[in-house]
Image (cartoon, grey):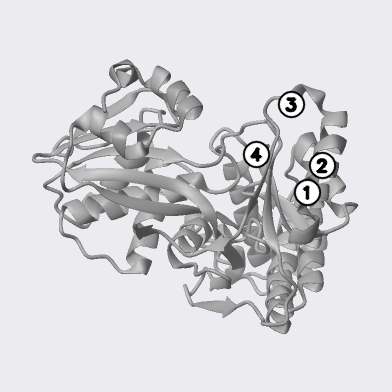
Amino acid sequence: MEFPNLKDTGILIITWKRNSIAMLDVYYSFFGNKDNVKKIFSPYRVCPLGAHVDHQHGLVSGFAIDKGVELLFAPSEDSIIEMKSLTFQGEIVFDLNIPVVCKKNDWGDYIRGAVYALKKRFHLKYGIKGLIKGSLPVGGLSSSAAVLVAYVLALSDANDISLTPMEIIRITSEAEREYVGLNNGILDQACVVLSEKDNLLYLDTDTNDYQLLPKANDMSEFEVGIIFSGLTRSLISSDYNLRVSECKVAAWNMLAAQKQTLRTLDKTFLRDVPESYFHETKGDFPKRFRKRAEHFYSECGRVKQGVNAWQKGDIHAFGRLIFDSCDSSINKYECGSPELIAIYNIMRETDGIYGGRFSGAGFKGACICLLDPTKKDAIQQSVTAKYLEQFPQYGGSFEFHFCKTDSGARFV
């Protein structure tokens, strides 16, 4: 099968959406028929509890979901990487032998970042010829982590490199922090790599110790709702990195008040400051930093409570904690656009939603919720109607999707 009009990537995206052309056929149209094409599925993730604490080495929880990134690839015969996308326009072509020093602010920065982080540890001889697509809109589900994990798996496979799960997590986290420029923790990458279907990932991002906690047999059934506000966002252009710095300054304030030795800001984390310091010193430093610390300590406490509720099979208590987490994100961490806050308020009053909050960093993007699958049609209709009544301008871009938990990134 040939698709002569698909050589222009913009036309390719339109044709893909209209005709649902098989992804492998599109791959062949670009790169020719190959016998050694492999496929990777790298899932998106949701974090029910543990918002905005992983970059301070806090406690987090998460699920992978059954929507994500698909990557078809074959090793190159040389050091050239050639990537095409069914989600973004343009193509990415570069030589592994040329250092990837500066990002170019396009979708190719993620595979350049993967190359950057891998080459710190390994010699890469072979590039890949790849085609990638995502199954949901970008925003709030850590699509960047899913993409980076897929690229690291593909490049490692092409170069006969064996990696442990924690090595994949560290490499992809470095790629995002040091090359792409987002100062996040390892929550996103850990969910994408470690998750197992019907299990809650409970991770200590300070020690990297984690548990996979199976769903209790007597727990009520749930599905994951993904609600896209219709307003896109970029974490790098948001206040995300500013909030990270504010958390570190809060830690500095408490340590200084206690006459403790200070370290450089990049080596300072709220997790290293006992909560007792916060209660003893919170009146002595500016309100904005006090609120960031208060969110951190209370959110880590909610993660512990949530794990207890999950293990007891109490989805209602688990959901209430998710709502409380979002309330703290709004009032203590001070994130959330008017659109996301509206969705949060609607979710709180919608029958059948156990709990919900902003997904990702909470700057534009999306909300997630855990919901009763027997009521999902009514939930979708009610949330959509109430949201678009407030924000009719997003009628063409607002989306509501239903997902289930899934296992981590893998070859399929």
Instruction: Mark 4: give few (<14), some (14-19) or many (20+) Cα within 10 Å.
Output: many
Q: Nearer the viewer, mark 4 or mark 2?
A: 2
The CA distance from mark 4 to mark 2 is 20 Å
> Which of the labelled discs sits on residue 365, or is there none?
4
Mark with earlier residue (4, 2): 4
Which amino acid does the dot numbered 4 rest on? Answer: Gly
Q: Nearer the viewer, mark 1 or mark 4?
A: 1
Label 1: element kind: helix
> Which of the labelled discs sits on residue 381, or is there none?
2
Label 3: element kind: helix
Pointer 3 residue: 394
Q: Nearer the viewer, mark 1 or mark 3?
A: 1
The CA distance from mark 1 to mark 2 is 6 Å
Pointer 1 residue: 377
- Front position in the image: 297 or 82: 82
The CA distance from mark 1 to mark 4 is 22 Å
Contact between labelled residues 4 and 1, with CB atoms less than 8 Å apart: no
In this view, 146 is above or below 231: below
The CA distance from mark 3 to mark 4 is 13 Å
Mark with earlier residue (1, 3): 1
Contact between labelled residues 2 and 1, with CB atoms less than 8 Å apart: yes
In this view, 31 is above or below 210: above
Label 2: element kind: helix
